Amino acid sequence: MTVLNLDAKLPFPDQAAPPDSFNIMSNDLPTVDFVVSRTHEGVTVSRYGDMVWDFTVYHPEGQPSNLVFTYWDQGVLTPDREKLVDEIKHIFFILIWLRDKQPLSIGTLRNYLTVVREVAKFAEQQNITLKEVIGNTPLFLEFVRSQNSGWLVETLSSLLLLLLGSSYQKFAIKTVEPETIRMLQKQNKQYRGSLKQHAPIPTRIYSEILANLVSYLDDWEKVSNELMKLVMECYQLKISRGNKRAYYHSILDNVSKPLRVFVITQTGKFTIKEIASLITDIQSICKLVIQAFTGMRDEEAQTLPYECIKEIISNSQKHFLIIGRTTKLNHGRAKATQWITSVEGLKAVRIAQKIADHIYQIHDDEAVQVDSDIFQYPLFISASYFGFTGKTIEPTTTKYRIGTLYSKQGINKLIPKIEQADLEELEQIDPHRAWRSEENFQIGQYWNLTTHQLRRSLALYAQRSGLVSLPSLRRQLQHITNEMSSYYAKGSAFAKNLIDSDKSHFANEWQQTQAESTSLGYIFNVLMSNTTLYGGHIHWIENTLKDEEGVVTVDRKKTLQRFKNGEIAYKETIIGGCTKVGSCNYTATNWLQINCLKENCRHLIVSLPKLERVITAQEKMINFLDISSLEYRTELSHLDVLRETKRKMIELEGATNV
């Protein structure tokens, strides 16, 4: 049976009303009144002839999603520009209606439009058509050479492959030869190879950022009740005046000194506009804290529902999951998922909920806490609904609009400057990367924070690997490390369900990073250690990895591969470390590793500074015991073993230094 009508291929949410179907027997492209998007009630949103195709109704979270075809920076629509716009629309008609593959996500379509607009700019400058640029090899290569962006060239080659593979030849667009596209693909590989992996945040900077974020939340909580009450009073005054200009001096003049100081410190002024802007700032900070203590991607955090906390009681302990949705690697279709978090992540959610409560209150919407469809109510609902920072949000096809959560003003104050030690740490983590030659890693400038760095750093540092030596960061990550070790570890039913259903989930990245984190901890604490070490494993290193000059040779690549292969493991212990793969027979019953010390276990690593601290603690503890008790005699025998180990280590160190 021949299909005459082609449906649009977009990732439609449930109950969405699709655009018009296209009759393939037509000899022309769609007419200007061809509907390209409509509400679920069937009301037309955009038509083919519009300069903007509004696909917000088809975005899984209802985020503003427009395909804007105006490619020029200045001037007005001219007949020549209108022809180029028609060519752009032709390309997107092919991508949406004529492809017989999986639908492209709206985000992918917008990426392609970014590239096509650049091609249109070039065509206008050369006084040629867009189709001439992508169909004529010399012109096409001239365009490629005019671009500085490897991403743009990569995305363009991907787009051309889709156009080459499109069906229905009478509507096809001629592109350059496949050989040219293969050449571009080769450049793509080189471009990807040149991409730098997201840098982990140096531990000092990471610790300060986490502390500053949490401190900001603490400061907010001290004034939040008064501030939100003030905002609601100003809003009511504005409404009572029918949205005409209102003067808020009578309200603003009667605030407490702490509130005034907080607002001025953060914004520089004390006006209702700055106060409303500050609400978006705190929403941005809450989002960052949630990302920092879950590993969520930016969009995953931004689109969280209001009712996103799920409490679990296990072994009399309370654990917190955050429920959300992800579209990553799912063709733009949202699917539910969840992340484990710590008390810091929980705190950020609770603060964001209190802000959202006031915004939902002005809509008289009490269903936010009881509606079974939790995704109707975003956690980070836009503060623009108050109408103090610009035009009030008008009703759209989505129930509530999510805020645009990026506050450079608020976040920049929380970022420390790069110091010499920070670069040295990065060079230890990856000695093959020329950190000091890169613009973003110069001493004295502020660390250039990206949200993916939070994900990468959490995956690397929230492991029991010994990689983190900074005590403050250990404390900050202790709770989330414990939670992730329980929920995301290999063999965990929770992790298995997540990873099987969502290969892009943070749990998978956490597991994959485990070998890297553990191998780096082993390299720093054992192979590159400047402290005196002792034990069976150290004996193995002395006889296996030392060169003729007595220097331990460190092959990072080979070491990492051994950890990935499961040939070696490393975990910190109270007196040093253990390299046994799998569980230890003694650790659970003897935290001092006395049996390991007695037998000089081949997996044992003893650090002299750690051993000395343990001996001091053991001596203090024994002083409080009854000398006639069995416990005293047992702990004293343990102390003797510890002291004997120290004596051997000092003797060996002395012999080595002779």
Image: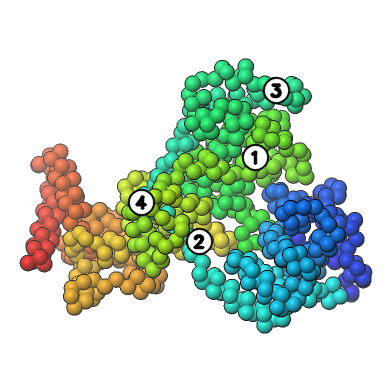
The image quadrant of residue 546 is: bottom left
> CA–CA distance between discs 2 and 4?
32 Å
Quarter occupied by the N terminus: bottom right
Q: Earlier in the sequence, mark 3 or mark 4?
A: 3
> CA–CA distance between discs 2 and 1?
30 Å
> Quick one: SS at disc 4?
loop
Query: Which residue lies at the image location 70% right of the left edge and 63% below the top edge?
Result: 118
Query: Which residue lies at the image location 88% right of the left edge and 66% below the top edge?
Result: 29
Where is residue 35? Give x, y as percent: 86, 56
Q: Which residue is mark 2?
A: 508
Q: Which residue is mark 3?
A: 246
Query: Which residue lies at the image location 11% right of the left edge and 54% below the top edge?
Result: 643
Please tell me whether mark 1 or mark 3 is closer to you in this view. 3
Q: Which residue is mark 4?
A: 419
Q: Earlier in the sequence, mark 2 or mark 4?
A: 4
Q: Earlier in the sequence, mark 1 or mark 3?
A: 3
Q: Which residue is mark 1?
A: 381
Amino acid identity at mark 2: Asn
Would residue 9 appear left or right of 327 to someone viewing this image?
right
